[in-house]
């Protein structure tokens, strides 16, 4: 009988490594960019472009129009404390989608205003509600929940929407106002808001990585903890975990709050009044728009740079240095009577104030953790919104009284320097003893 020789068994070698799926946190960043871009663009940059034509057609003073952003901030005082806990417990998806619809409808109606009270109701109340639901606290707190090790770059990339708002909406609004008039421009921008913000929210936004079986930064899945409510997951042990009551008892929180508010006041002032200021200096509309766009481009560049720096350097040190440099940029603005000085201001201010949202959105989760971040920031939003709204209004009053912006711009120099001092005093608080409430993330 012939001997049979067994054929060698073929053994499969290791196949190609499975392609790793993109961490969903980066889609959260994309959606946050959309929300900030489409909310801050109309509310800040488009309004700055439309300020002069609105005053000419309607006969309203600049301080009267500037009261609308103040009313917007007053409305935001009531929105933040409501949105914060909702954000922690249920996430941003429905909030942001509804905000896109409300914001778009408000801008469409804004094209039909004929009385100042209508402008106040629509812009100061309606669009403020939309902003509180679709940008700012909602986007920044959500991004912070998805990242820890890479939080600096993630927050910086998400904050690009703030600067892109100026890059996109300053020239876009200028073209629309020149070709179609400010009324039809508002309506078209409203349609654009609804067509972008709502779909992005529904498709991309989620509360936190644990809800999808993930961990921050895309690490391995986090197991559910026995004995906790369904859906509750432990916060990472290396994170600080503060409740709003615990945080409110620390002096650091109040130092951060007032420092952030002073810087917010300065940004609101320059963004609202800079185009009108350059027009007063005799700049053409094209030149003034180019200066403002240069500022936004530099602010866009600053965000990822500062984001990477913050991952390696103390965020408190970054906040102090940034505030001092911002004050220097405001000095240049106060005396920017020539195009050369105007562009020098745009570059200096863009590279400094452009990073302020990144620094502020980093320092809160780093000091107080991400577990109740929305609740903590929402609880103190009334103070933040008030200062942000007062900047343009008080500056408008100073302009009407003196016929110049110099006094207002020198005042914000002092505000920036004061914020630097407050940031220097705001040392990281000592971690409190944890209880059951602060050890878990609220169930969805």
Image (cartoon, rainbow, N blue to C red):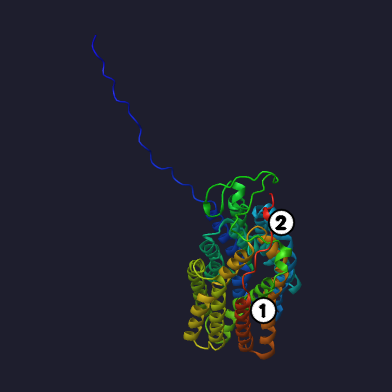
Vertical placement of 73 versus 4: above or below? below
Number of residues whose C-alpha sits closer than 10 Å to that of mark 2, classed few (under 14), some (14–19) or many (20 or more): few
Between label 2 and label 1, give the one nearer the viewer: 2
Q: In this view, does 194 lie to the left or right of 75?
A: left
Q: Residue 338: percent from the left, percent from the top?
A: 50, 88
- The residue most toward the front is 433
Vertical placement of 324 versus 304: above or below? below
- The residue most toward the top is 1
Number of residues whose C-alpha sits closer than 10 Å to that of mark 1, classed few (under 14), some (14–19) or many (20 or more): many
Q: In which quarter of the image is residue 34?
A: bottom right
Vertical placement of 221 versus 146: above or below? above
Q: Residue 334: percent from the left, percent from the top?
A: 57, 87
Q: From where the camera sits, is residue 4 visible?
A: yes
Q: Residue 274: percent from the left, percent from the top?
A: 58, 80
Vertical placement of 46 versus 396: above or below? above
Q: Name the residue under label 1.
A: 391
Report the Cα–Cα distance between label 2 and label 1: 40 Å
Asked which secondary structure carries label 1, the reply is: helix
Q: Quadrant of residue 27?
A: bottom right
Q: Nearer the viewer, residue 223 or 431?
A: 431
Q: Residue 183: percent from the left, percent from the top?
A: 64, 68
Quarter of the picture containing the N terminus is: top left
Report the disc number at residue 435: 2
Q: Do the numbered discs 2 and 1 sit on residues whose CB atoms are within 8 Å?
A: no
Q: Quadrant of residue 282?
A: bottom right
- The residue most toward the bottom is 402
Q: Which of disc 1 and disc 2 is earlier in sequence?
A: 1
Q: Which residue is drawn at 53% across and 67% down?
A: 164
Q: Which of 372 and 263 is in front in this view?
A: 372
Q: Which of 125 and 113 is in front in this view?
A: 125
Q: From where the camera sits, is residue 119 visible?
A: no
Asked which secondary structure carries label 2, the reply is: loop
């Amino acid at each position: 009988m012939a001997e049979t020789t067994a054929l060698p068994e073929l053994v499969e070698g290791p196949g190609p490594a499975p392609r790793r799926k993109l961490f969903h946190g980066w889609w959260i960043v994309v959606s946050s960019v959309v929300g900030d871009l489409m909310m801050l663009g109309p509310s800040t940059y488009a309004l700055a472009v439309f300020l002069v034509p609105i005053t000419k057609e309607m006969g309203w003073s600049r301080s009267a129009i500037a009261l609308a952003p103040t009313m917007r901030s007053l409305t935001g005082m009531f929105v933040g404390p409501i949105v914060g806990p909702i954000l922690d417990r249920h996430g941003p998806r429905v909030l942001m989608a509804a905000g896109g619809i409300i914001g778009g409808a408000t801008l469409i109606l804004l094209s039909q205003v004929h009385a100042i009270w209508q402008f106040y109701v629509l812009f100061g109340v309606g669009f403020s509600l939309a902003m509180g639901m679709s940008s700012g606290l909602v986007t920044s707190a959500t991004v912070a929940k998805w990242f820890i090790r890479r939080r600096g770059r993630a927050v910086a990339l998400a904050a690009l929407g703030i600067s892109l708002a100026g890059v996109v909406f300053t020239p876009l609004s200028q073209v629309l106002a020149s070709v179609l008039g400010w009324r039809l421009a508002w309506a078209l921008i409203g349609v654009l808001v609804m067509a972008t913000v709502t779909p992005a929210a529904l498709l991309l936004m989620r509360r936190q990585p644990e809800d999808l079986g993930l961990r921050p930064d895309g690490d391995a899945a986090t197991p559910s903890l026995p004995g906790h409510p369904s859906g509750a997951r432990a916060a990472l042990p290396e994170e600080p975990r503060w409740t709003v009551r615990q945080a409110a008892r620390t002096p650091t929180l109040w130092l951060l709050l007032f420092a952030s508010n002073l810087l917010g006041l300065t940004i609101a002032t320059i963004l609202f009044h800079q185009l009108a200021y350059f027009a007063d200096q005799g700049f053409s509309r094209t030149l003034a728009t180019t200066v403002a766009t240069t500022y936004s481009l530099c602010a866009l560049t600053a965000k990822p740079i500062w984001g990477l720096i913050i991952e390696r350097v103390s965020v408190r040190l970054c906040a102090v240095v940034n505030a001092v440099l911002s004050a220097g940029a405001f000095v240049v603005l106060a005396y920017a009577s020539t195009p050369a000085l105007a562009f020098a201001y745009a570059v200096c201010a863009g590279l400094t104030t452009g990073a302020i949202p990144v620094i502020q959105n980093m320092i809160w989760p780093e000091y107080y953790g991400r577990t109740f971040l929305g609740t903590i920031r929402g609880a103190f939003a009334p103070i933040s919104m008030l200062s942000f709204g007062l900047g343009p209004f008080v500056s408008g009053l100073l302009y009407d009284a003196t016929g110049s912006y110099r006094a207002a711009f020198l005042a914000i120099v002092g505000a920036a320097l004061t914020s630097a001092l407050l940031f220097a005093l705001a040392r990281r608080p000592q971690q409190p003893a944890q209880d059951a409430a602060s050890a878990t993330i609220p169930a969805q």
